[in-house]
Amino acid sequence: MEKACVFGSGGWGTALAQLLAEKGYNVAQWVREPEVADEINGKGTNSIFLPEVQLSEKIRACTGEEEVLDGAGIVLLVIPTQHLRSVVVKVRDLLPVGVPLVNCGKGIERGSLALMSEVLTDELPGKYHPYIAHLSGPSFAKEVARGMPANVTVASASKEAALSVQAILGEPKFRVYTSTDVAGVLIGGAIKNVIAIASGACDGLGFGLNARASLITRGLAEMTRLAAAMGANPLTLAGHAGVGDLVLTCTGDLSRNHMVGFELGLGKSLEEIIGSMRMVAEGVETSRSTWQLSRKLDIEMPITEQVYTVLHEGKPVRDAAEYLMSRTPKDEVDPYPSPWSAKE
C-alpha cells in the first residue's frame, strides 16, 4: 500500500495524516474548507485545527471525495459523531472494497442513540462490514503529530481487520493494541467526554484534586455499567479505551471537553463557550444521547445525568455538584451476582 486516505481535517485527522506520512505513505486528506486545503498544500500547516505543527510533504489535501478515496489502501473516517452518517451516505459508492475502514470518532448519535459501529453497518453494504474497525484510546492530536509516545486500541468484529490496522498504524511511538470488543471500546471513547465535562466543572469550581479523582472513579463505574448492559466486557473499560482515555481527557490541558466544563464552572454560559470554539467538544451532544440511552436501559448514571441537565436544561453547575455530593451513601460495588448488569 502506498496511498492512505484520511477523511477529515480537524486536529485528530491531521495528526493521523502526519503519522501515516511519517511512516512513508502518500496521504490524501479530505478537507471541507478550501482555505484549510490551500494552507496544508501551500505551507504545510493547519493553523486552525492543529497549530504549531509542520506537516509532511507527503500529505496532499483535497476537497473532492472521489480524488482522495481512489486507490486508497486504508480509509480513516475522522468525522464528528453527529455528521458521520451523512458523510458515509455521501461517499459509500466511492469507498474502495477490501481495505480497512477505520472510524476514529467518539460519541453516540443524537436521536438514534446508535454507536458508530451501528451507524456504519446500517449505511454501508455488507461487502464493507468485515473491514470496519474503530480507533480509540488516550491520544491528544498535538502530541501524536509531534511524535510523542501514545498507546491506543483498535477494535473490530473481525480480528483480521484489527490486525491490519495495527500493522498499518502501529510503530514504537504509536503502539496499537487490538480488541474484538467493539461496544466496550466505543462506549469508553464516547462517555469519557461526558465525564471530562464534569471533571472540568469540578476544577472550575475549585473543588480540588481529591474531588476530581473521585469523580473520575465514579465516572468509570458509570461507563462500565452501561458497557456491560450493552454486552461489552467490563475489563475493556480498564484498558486504554476506558480508564486510559478517561484519565487523559479529564485531566489534560489539551482536552476540549474538560475546557468546556472548566469554563462552565467559572460561570460562563454554554453558548458563550461553544461560540468561541472552532473544534467540536463531542461530550456536549453525547451527554444528551448517553442520558437518553441510560434511561432506555434503566442504568444508573448520576454524573452523566447532571452533565445533561446543566448543558441542556440550564441547571446551575454548583447545584448539580451539590446534588452529586448529597446523594444517599451506598456500597461502592454493585451486589453480587450481577455487579455489571442493568437493574432488574
Image (spheres, rainbow, N blue to C red):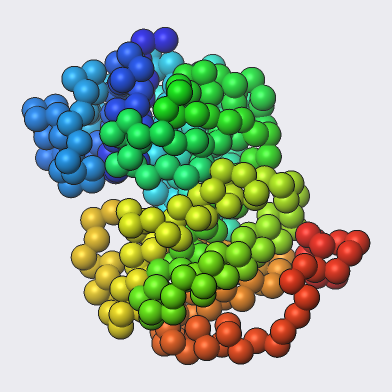
Q: Residue 234, relative to residue 315: is it above or below?
A: above
Image coordinates of residue 31 in percent, x first then y, are 25, 36
Q: Quadrant of residue 341?
A: bottom right
Looking at the image, residue 110 lies above or below residue 54: below
In the rendered image, which quarter contains the N terminus?
A: top left
Residue 13 image position (x, y, % from top left):
34, 37
Q: Residue at x 39, y 61 (%)?
A: 257
- The image shows a total of numbered marks equal to 0
Answer above or below: position of 273 versus 254.
Answer: below
Q: Which residue is pictured at 12% across the width and 40% down the height?
A: 35
Query: In front: 110, or 147?
Result: 147
Q: Nearer the viewer, residue 89 or 84?
A: 84
Q: Is residue 133 visible?
A: no
Residue 219 falls in which quadrant of the image? bottom right
- The residue under the point 34% across, 26% down is 19
Residue closer to the observer: 74 or 273: 273
Q: Is residue 341 visible?
A: yes
- Residue 320 point in image, percent of width and height: 50, 84
User: Which quarter shows the C terminus?
Assistant: bottom right
Residue 299 higher or lower than 120, as above or below: below
Q: In this view, which residue lies farthest toward the left?
A: 42
Q: Residue at x 57, y 70 (%)?
A: 214
- Residue found at the far right of this picture: 337
Which is nearer the eye, 101 or 57?
A: 57
The x, y position of residue 240, in whole percent, is: 56, 43
